Image (cartoon, helix red, strand yellow):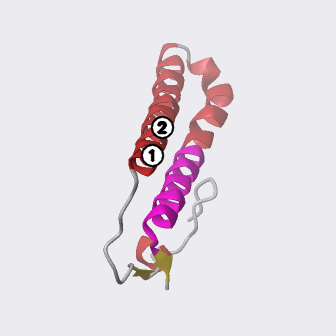
Amino acid sequence: MHLNGLAKLPLHIHRLHMVLPNQPVTLSVEQVADLNKRLSTMRHDINGDLALIVAAAELIKLNPSTAERMLTTLLEQPTKIRERADKFSRDFETMLGIKKG
């Protein structure tokens, strides 16, 4: 089954082995602030994407004739959410020195 860009393979196939740093990782105050800002932005953006899903569903419920138009909005959101989470994960892993192995 293929859902709007989500691969057919089981979730566990997509996980890659992550190689953690051998030494403790120290982040500066600025790096922690940057990471916190990125996390806050990701949460805000994902909440917006979820709000669009709820709004589209409510519009369909109130006016079923909008279903075709709203379906596009509904189907775009999971990909946006995944992309936002993936970008944050890459930034987080880079900042902490985590590599894919």
Q: Position of residue 38 (x, y in %)?
A: 48, 43
Secondary structure of the residue carrying tag 2 is helix
Q: Position of residue 2 (x, y in %)?
A: 59, 62
Location of residue 36 (image quadrant): top left
Residue 24 lies left or right of residue 2; in this view the side is left
Quick check: 18 above or below 76? below
Quick check: 22 above or below 8? below
The verdict on residue 81 being magenta is yes
**Residue shown at 48% from the left, 37% from the top:** 46
Quick check: 26 above or below 44? below
What's the mark number on residue 46?
2
The verdict on residue 76 being magenta is no
Under mark 2, the amino acid is Ile
Location of residue 21 (image quadrant): bottom left
**Residue shown at 49% from the left, 13% from the top:** 62
- Disc 1 residue crowd, few under 14, some 14–19, many 20+, Cα 10 Å: few
Of labels 2 and 1, earlier in sequence is 1
Mark 1 lies on residue: 30
Residue 69 or residue 35, whichever sits in front:
35
**Magenta region: which residues?**
78-98
What's the mark number on residue 92?
none
